[in-house]
Image (spheres, coloured by chain):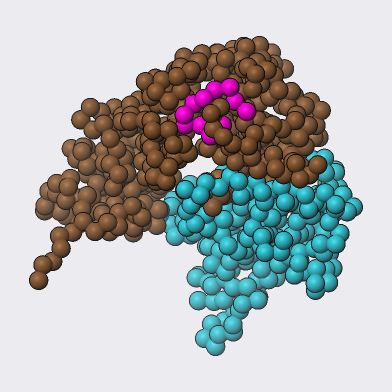
Amino acid sequence: MSERLREKLNILADAAKYDVSCSSSGGNRKNDNKGLGNSHASGICHTYTEDGRCVSLLKILLTNHCIFDCAYCVSRKSNDITRAAFTVEEVVELTMNFYRRNYIEGLFLSSGIFKNADFTMERLLRIVKKLRLEERFNGYIHLKTIPGASEELIREAGMYADRMSINLEMPTESGLKLLAPEKTHQQVTQPLGFIKNQIVQFKEERKLIKSTPKFVSAGQSTQMVIGATPETDQEIMQTAALFYKDFSLKRVYYSGYIPISYDNRLPMIGSQPPLIRENRLYQTDWLMRFYGFHVNELLNDANPHLDIDIDPKLSWALRNLQHFPVDINVAAYKVILRIPGIGVTSAKKIVQARKFGKLRIDQLKKIGVAYNRAKHFIKCADSPYQLKDYQGSQIKAFIQAESQSKYLKYDTSQLILF
Amino acid sequence: MQNYIFDGSFEGLLSAVFNWFERKPGQVKLQTEATFQPDAFMSCLHIVNEREKADRVWKGLQSNLSKAALRKFYCTYLSELEEGYTALFEFACYLFTEGPAIEKNYGNPYVLALSKIAKKVEREKHRMEAFIRFQQNADGIFYCGIDPDFNVLPLIATHFKNRYADQQWIIYDLKRNYGLFYDLSKVEEIKIDFNQRQKTTGIANAIVSEKEGLYALLWKDYFKSTNIQARKNTKLHVQHVPKRYWKYLTEKQFEQD
């Protein structure tokens, strides 16, 4: 019995690992029925894989049987792999026992599609209901919505899940058509829109009637596979920006494609996943969500791709030197946020601290500003007087020369000949 | 300059602050009994713990500091760091001289020190919430032994009490030799007399429950199958899961199998 469970877990956790989302944040479920578990707004990563990604949820597929044949997916129908499926009881027991030992923050449940969308969705629903109602489990639950499932099932599942998501898979419709002819973006946007409307509706009702249950309280997210199809960074981030706006998503995940198929529409097996690019996309995402940048400032027709060798904020600053230098002792918070080398925390500290007197270089360093980077863009109380007006490319060279970044160690300087 | 020597307790620290305002001795150097080395050229004063005076200082801190700053104050104390005690002492003196606005003056070295040390303590608190791995003993109690750098048990008690409301658990600080026990209604401080062997192995493996081995194994399996070989990044892994915690992490115990 336990051997079979082990085998299933190995197969179904293995297939689920390509889903990037493992966040357990945004939940606010309290343990007020004296049951097991609660969830924090900040979430907890309980461990990290050897590739450095956070593990906070038991992330598994209910089954890797699937009626679809999407080229980028390990569970695709035509792939010759061992198939397995959990029973409802097995998933519940694994979740409860892992949670009791403080291994996880909750469950991330996704599934291949067996028979049809409703049949699969109904199984997922049975699992969350059993966890919430019978086991009094209050930990985090992230459910993958099955595209094409009926609205009644999705609505009911939303009463028990903290977060729901549907993967966009490819950033553009044409990319998706190429690799998954049976799927369309519309199949994703329809349930995303439905859930968003339900969230708004439940919130309104809660204002009037306190006892209205919470609905998908940690919001919705989606995921795009990057580098399997030839989209530009501009296309990717514009899709993301649009989805943030239209469906009030909490997160968009960007998953660098890891070659898993010999299909000639896709990058070859063994080619390196685009890790740096993925990192730059996340940085851009952060700039949009927390730094007040509009997507068009960072990516536009003149600059359709993100720089690989410098981060997008520095890259923007170098293209827009007319906004600098910024006097950090007088500038508005929003302006300070745009200075390379200054993050949200240091920007806030600067605004607080300057009420007590003009800030000097040594104080900025102690506050946590990456001064070697920021110094090209700021003025503070004791900034040295600069005679020379540097070009963007010169500043970039200065920063790169001092930089510790693991990406920048290609030697770009001229070789000395004799 | 004078040496102020206190016993390392919170009450002692607050008494020292009270004493400074009573006597106004100018600049002093605060040290704990444990690390104090007598100095031929500096006089020293042993702080007497006085409950009432300490309470008055604590009340003063409570009414002059925001909730967040008060928490930083307490966390810095739990760091058990010598420079943390100094920062707390100087911070309190600065606060009562200049008034409540100073808590945000990050240009001041002690305000900044509090902020930084508290952050370290909060980080370890968060890590303990993440890295504690319970083992179910034969008597049904979930047990975990830890040895954090800072004294974080007081900070994590509520978290575990709220989360594991329907199971009995013990979290034991092996370094400071005290623990927390939750009996399904309240959390209590306990002391266990481990024998030497139990101290090194955490708790004797013999008393863990039957199911325990299976779930530990399933968790190790899970940990392995979530890894993507093509993205291996050991540096990042170690940065997130520092090696000093590995001995307590179920998923990091391969050799013993």
Q: Is residue A153 visible?
A: yes
Q: Residue at x 39, y 57 (%)?
A: A366
Q: Chain A is drawn in which colour?
A: brown
For chain B, the rendered hue is: cyan
Residue at image x 22%, y 42%? Answer: A318
In the image: residue A269, left or right of residue A58:
left
Highlighted magenta segment, given as a residue range: A65-75
Q: Residue A332, position in %: x, y? A: 32, 36
Q: Say which quadrant the C terminus of chain A sits in.
A: bottom left
Q: Is residue A225 magenta?
A: no
- Residue A24: give x, y in percent of width and height: 60, 37
Towards the viewer: B55 or A255: A255
Q: Is residue A67 above or below residue A269?
A: above
The structure residue drawn at horizontal position 58% and vertical position 66%, both measured from the top left corner, is: B81
Magenta span includes A66? yes
Tell which residue pokes out farthest to the bottom in this image: B40
